[in-house]
Amino acid sequence: MATELSMTCCTSATLDCKKLERRVEQEGTSFLTITLPSFGKDFERCLDQGFVDVYAFPGFKRKHGLPLFLGGFLHHVFDTSGVILTDEHGSKGHDLLVDSISAIRQLCYLFAKIELPASETRVARAMRGYISCEQDLQEKRSTISADSLLDFRRIASLVFHRTFSSIDNLIYAGEVRGKHGPGATADGLTGNGKFDQLEWTERLESVFPMREHLVANNVREDQLDHVEILEPGKERPVKVISVPKTLKTPRIIAIEPTCMQYMQQAMLEPLVEFLEPEVSVPEKDRDLGSYFLGFRDQNPNRDLARNASRRGDLATLDLSEASDRVLNELVLALLHRNPLFSEAVQATRSTHARVLVRNEEIILELNKFASMGSALTFPIEAMVFLVIVLMGIEKSARVTLTRKHVKSLVGSLRIYGDDILVPVDHVHAVMKELESFGLLVNRSKSFWTGKFRESCGGDYYDGFDVTPVKFRRKFPTSRRCVKELISLVEFRNHVYYRGMWKTARYLDGEIGKILPHFPIIADTSAALGRASFLHFQPEKIMHGDTQTPVVKAFVPQSRPPASTVSGDGALLKFFLKRGNTPSQEGHLERSGRPQSSSIKLRWVSPVGCGVSWLPD
């Protein structure tokens, strides 16, 4: 990849490859997974500030102010004094600059998100960070002034009152229906077992009586005798675990109890529908907040970031530990005018967490609203961030926000989770306001001065996409490594579409050693195959039923694990079903996320999600 990108950028990567080999021999894969991404972050900071400072790129030798490593690429981006090159070199020079920026980021971030388990030391450090975060929030609670909370409540009512009132009415009318997700639960229920719940809480019972949510009908009085109702002090805490993010810092999430997850999903559904309505919904029926929030589509954020990288009018902000730093007091303030909705949100909020640090179990009382893992974390945190951002803009503009003022921000303010875009003119006031409420702005991943912007996985420089393709899993060694094979094929196809055709050809050879049949297919095919700008080449055989062309290829397949359900649970599952699509065959015997998968050689359509079959 380095050799191919160097040809694109009119330089040589021979010395870079030798340096890479030496450093990996000395430091192991941490050079690829930790050191190189750190090099990339320093590079982005230099792009943002417009020059290379003396603190950038520690651990790498320099010459004329720039690192020797990747020096051929860097000299197309910065001059000999370390200042970023401008457009005065013409369009050809500008194209070379953009290509070099893209190449450096591609090489630095190639292995940044590989899914390998972090060391026990790093996991323990992340767990201690989770505990430390709770202590920080405890201290922050006493520093938030009453005036700030009043302003927070005022703006929350301004932008969300219609949504909150509508959900209040749904809860009052009993039109909120529970929903089970596919993930793990703190009490160990999986698949169909979730429809035969064994626990409920007094807090849930006060808002969502289990006779209305745990059974399909309440004719029999003995249906819920097996369900234990837990008092507030006896509730099951969330289970805090680590999952792969980067080898440097694993991601910390919390697994919720089944009953909590069930009703969180119930409220998530209407909340997202109101806050991210279909385009056809009339403007008079939309809340102001719906113009600034996204939950299902990241493209609006990416489009704004792309345009901002060219025009420089918007800043992209990133928050560290975003989910874990939203105080529950702010959620109470957010919903202060809608007591029923507020009570429902608090009833589905777990109040304690079980953290395991090197075999030592710690039970924490939570100051945060919820960790990542709660179904309500994502929309609630986005609403809180929007209110605080508007408070910062209000202070910066020195006006009291009205509907007209807020409406004028449409197209220059957007929030998707913790990815925030705000007008550059207000960025410092917004960051100050966010931090005053206990949030941490990650300045190394926030950009507003140069031509680089990133948001929702899209990275842009001066309007050009410079997003790297990332290698996610270990290299497969046989056809039994199904997840690794699927990941490698996806990686190969992304590389191909990015124009790195020599790298794609190399990967074709490696994949071909494992998959003897690796045909050209369209993106919509169910088979494992090669993406190509050339047309697929079907075999001479035609599908026996549809008379359409087919190719011989390996097709991934998996089965949900065996999971039975009682008669009452099966009836409840039927009534909770969404949509008109028929349930999967055998869904009452098998349910949940597949625990294993395999690949089979089939004749399959190269263009559709269709049929895979074995000819007679």
Image (cartoon, rainbow, N blue to C red):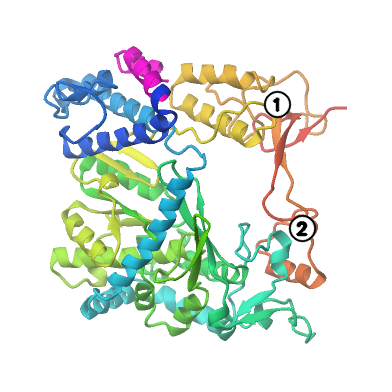
Is residue 457 shown above or below 326? above
Residue 43: quadrant of the picture: top left
- Mark 1: amino acid: Ala
In the rendered image, residue 10 lying in the magenta stretch gets the answer: yes
Compare residues 303 and 184 and report the one nearer the observer.
184
- Residue at 56%, 65% (x, y): give it: 256
Q: Position of residue 243 (x, y in %)?
A: 51, 49
Q: Secondary structure at mark 2?
A: loop
- Mark 2: amino acid: Ser
Q: Is residue 519 visible?
A: yes
Residue 513 left/right relative to 395:
right
Q: Which mark is residue 209?
A: none
Characterize the local packing of mark 2: few (<14), some (14-19) or many (20 or more) Cα atoms within 10 angstroms.
some
- Residue at 20%, 44% (x, y): give it: 312
Is residue 350 shown above or below 38? below
Magenta range is 1-24
Q: CA distance from mark 2 to mark 1?
A: 31 Å
Is residue 525 shown above or below 167? above
In the rendered image, residue 14 lying in the magenta stretch gets the answer: yes
Residue 336: quadrant of the picture: bottom left
Q: Position of residue 389 (x, y in %)?
A: 26, 63
Look at the image and tell me in which quarter the N terminus lies.
top left
- Residue at 21%, 42% (x, y): give it: 311
The residue to which callout 2 is attached is 563
Characterize the local packing of mark 1: few (<14), some (14-19) or many (20 or more) Cα atoms within 10 angstroms.
many
Identify the main secondary structure in magenta: helix
Q: Is residue 294 visible?
A: no
Q: Which mark is residue 553?
A: 1
Foreground label between 2 and 1: 2
Residue 274 left/right relative to 18:
right
Q: Position of residue 222 (x, y in %)?
A: 79, 84
Compare residues 129 and 76 and report the one nearer the observer.
129
